[in-house]
Image (cartoon, grey):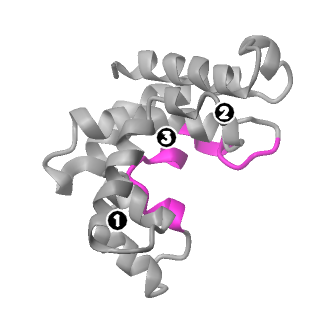
Amino acid sequence: MSIATYRDDPLYPRVVRSVESILARSRVVAPVDVLVGMGLLAASDLDEWRRGRVLYLERAVHCNRGACWGAAWGDARFMVTRPVTIKAMLRVCASLAAEDAEPAYQRVGRWTARLAPWGERVREFRAEGFYERFVAKGQVERVGRIARELARSVGVE
């Protein structure tokens, strides 16, 4: 992503709406508030994190990453937790949030089942040969390509 292309990112309109909403009532925009505004983080979960009841904020984000990727999550031999893949997963989860948000109390279970096919793709995300499997001119293009592949595998538009 660059200064010239950031507006082309599919998440850009949702980020803008969230930031505008925050600025309408405050002079400060915190990244976590943007996640709440985008529907990727429940305000109650953010409050629990701020109170120290949730150790890692990533555990509260409404996209069950580790359950989908299994042992590859956080394993240096895989590219699953690298920025390029995380950005792609966030794009897919943002789209999923738009189409499957309610009822919120059942979301984790639905999404875990819905994102389960990602676990079948773990081998594609091995560090060895990753850039050959996801050929792109740069990170922005690679993020887009990975997001399309991940979205297609779970039926998200």
Q: Residues within 10 Å of mark 3 (few under 14, many from 20)?
A: some
Q: Give me the C-alpha separation between circle 1 and circle 3.
A: 23 Å
**Number of other residues with Cα within 10 Å of mark 1, as a class: few under 14, some 14 to 19, many 20 or more:** few
Q: Which residue is mark 3?
A: 90
Q: Residue at x 25, y 48 (%)?
A: 107
Numbered disc in front, either 2 or 3: 2
Relative placement, left or right, of 27 versus 100 is: right
Instruction: State whether residue 149 is above or below residue 48.
Output: above
* Residue pointed to by mark 2: 1
Question: Label 1 belongs to which residue?
Answer: 23
Dividing the image into 4 quarters, which one contains the C terminus? top left
Q: Earlier in the sequence, mark 1 or mark 2?
A: 2
Camera-side residue of 111 and 148: 148
Q: What secondary structure is found at the residue carrying circle 3? A: helix
Looking at marks 1 and 3 on the same chain, the residue that comes earlier in the sequence is marked by 1
Q: Name the amino acid type tagged 2.
A: Met
Residue occupying image coordinates x 42% and y 47%: 63
If the image is split into quadrants, where does the N terminus sit?
Answer: top right
